[in-house]
Amino acid sequence: MVFEDVIGQSHVTETLRNAITSHRVAHAYIFSGTRGCGKTTTARILARALNCLKPVNANPDNACSHCLDIIAGKSLDVVEIDGASNRGVEEIRNLRESVRYAPINGKFKVYIIDEVHMLTKEAFNALLKTLEEPPQHVVFVFATTEAHKVPQTILSRCQRFDFRRIGMDEIVASLRFIAREENVGIDDDTLAIIAKKGDGSLRDAQSIFDQVRSFCGNDIKAAEVIKVLNVVDQELYFRLSDIVHDHNAKAGIELIDEVSGKGYDLREFVSGLAEHFRNLLVVQSTDSTRLVETSEPFKRRYQSEARRFSEVDILRLIKQTTDLEQGIRWAPQPRFKLEAAILQMVKMEDAVQIGELLAELGELKKKLTPAHPAIDGLRVPKIENVENIKLVGAVQAGTLRSPSVMSYASYAATSQSIPFAAPRAAVKSADRLENRAPGALNKETVVHRWPDFVQDVTKNRIAVGTTLSESRLLDLSEGLVRIGCPDDYHLSTLKRNKDFLAESFHRITGSRISIEPVLHKEPSSATETARATVNIPAPQQDLPAPSGRAEEHPVVRALIKVLGAEKVE
């Protein structure tokens, strides 16, 4: 085996060949990458190339005595160490002692340490001095799948090569070559199934190929490969996307029953479903199947299937699938969770672009003109002012006769309890209020917009909004709004935030005003006055009036009566 036989790592093999040719071989290399991508194989080829008696274009000839000894594992000049089994400081100390001796037959003494990240901290420290000042005849090659676990002091003294994940097409080409050399009948679609199962690892793909060949013999069919590997048939994913598109809930449940009945791993099925939607998104976004790892027939199906979904809908499906993939991992009943998620996908309505929706609303608003007697004066209200519309309707119906004595809490309770009695008149009134010039601000406008004002203040400063909701509007005169506060705490809070309240009021009404909080003690009958004003029946008074004793306090009596409280001596 030579450097050209390493699949998919030309950026590594070309660099190593050039280093050998120019006699610029480093004293230490670190090969990092996923499993089965050729790290250890490349290290062995490098060891043979450095010691070969008759190299050809910086490649070993694999025929000289040195190459044959290395291939047979008999050479004393090439030492392979398993970092997981020899991870202690004592093993590294023995290595330090052995590097002093010159090679017996070859030019270099090569130490290949596999899974070097498994060494202990003390072992790395013991190795550090040797890496700083190595003998001229020693070359270290470290292979690891987790380079981030190797200390930076070691990494900085090595030439690092990152081995990439092997592409599916490259694995298929390698397996095709093996099948042709061994006279095995297998088509490219079946090879694609094996390569996909290998997941970027050529070694895994070759092991799966040997397993399938043992089961099928020299004539391998796709159906048999799916059966022996228990791979989820990709046809199921296309059926599921059709079910989602057609909103067929029954077929969705039956499909999950089929998946479960065939013994597929539900987590693997969900992972494949996420990849299926990803492929649809890639084809939808790029209008190409180049980035989709599957066989050509399925690539053509993705090309046609992607046109049935919008990009937004595919993104929503991917979001639901990834959430399902996380949730099903720890679910005690993964099938139930999968069925619920599939039903959510099936019931999901098609997404509507905001721009299209606004355009349709604009067209609708143009059609709603006074020429239609049934909708005379009607306009499309703002969504955020639904509560305000209810309040205006109550005013037009004559329910609120004296709003000046009402607090915000009374307004809110009234707007929720009183039905919308006169919608057309209410909308007309709201239209007049919103279109009124800032200079025409009067008390009626302030009363009507007061709930929105309090809500806006609460949204931005909840403490100030709460204080404002417990105060009430007194009057308006010459751009000055007087707010009655029940105590000194409310008064000081509103005074500190007068400028903020004025800006919020301007944002809601479009009018510039000044805020003047004043201390205003309510008479005992104020609650009854407000309740009578808005036609809210008084609650049943089943507690006596408060007296000087604590036991006679209404709250204490309520605790005793409702909760069975007892006095503690």
Image (cartoon, rainbow, N blue to C red):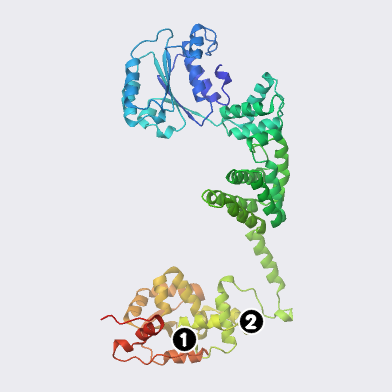
Marks 2 and 1, the one that precedes in the sequence: 1
- Residue 249, percent across and down? 69, 57
The secondary element bearing badge 2 is classed as helix
Frontmost residue, 231 versus 239: 231
Tell how many labels.
Answer: 2
Q: Residue at x 70, y 56 (%)?
A: 250
Taking 69 as reference, is 545 above or below it? below
Q: Residue at x 54, y 80 (%)?
A: 416
Residue at the extreme left of the image, as rendered: 569
Residue where numbered disc 2 is placed? 423
Q: Quadrant of the N terminus?
A: top right
Frontmost residue, 200 versus 380: 200
Q: Quadrant of the C terminus?
A: bottom left
The secondary element bearing badge 1 is classed as loop
Q: CA distance from mark 2 to mark 1?
A: 23 Å
Query: Mark 2 packing: few (<14 Cα in 10 Å), some, or many (20+)?
Result: some
Frontmost residue, 342 versus 448: 342
Residue where numbered disc 1 is placed? 406
Residue 351 lies in what quarter of the image? bottom right
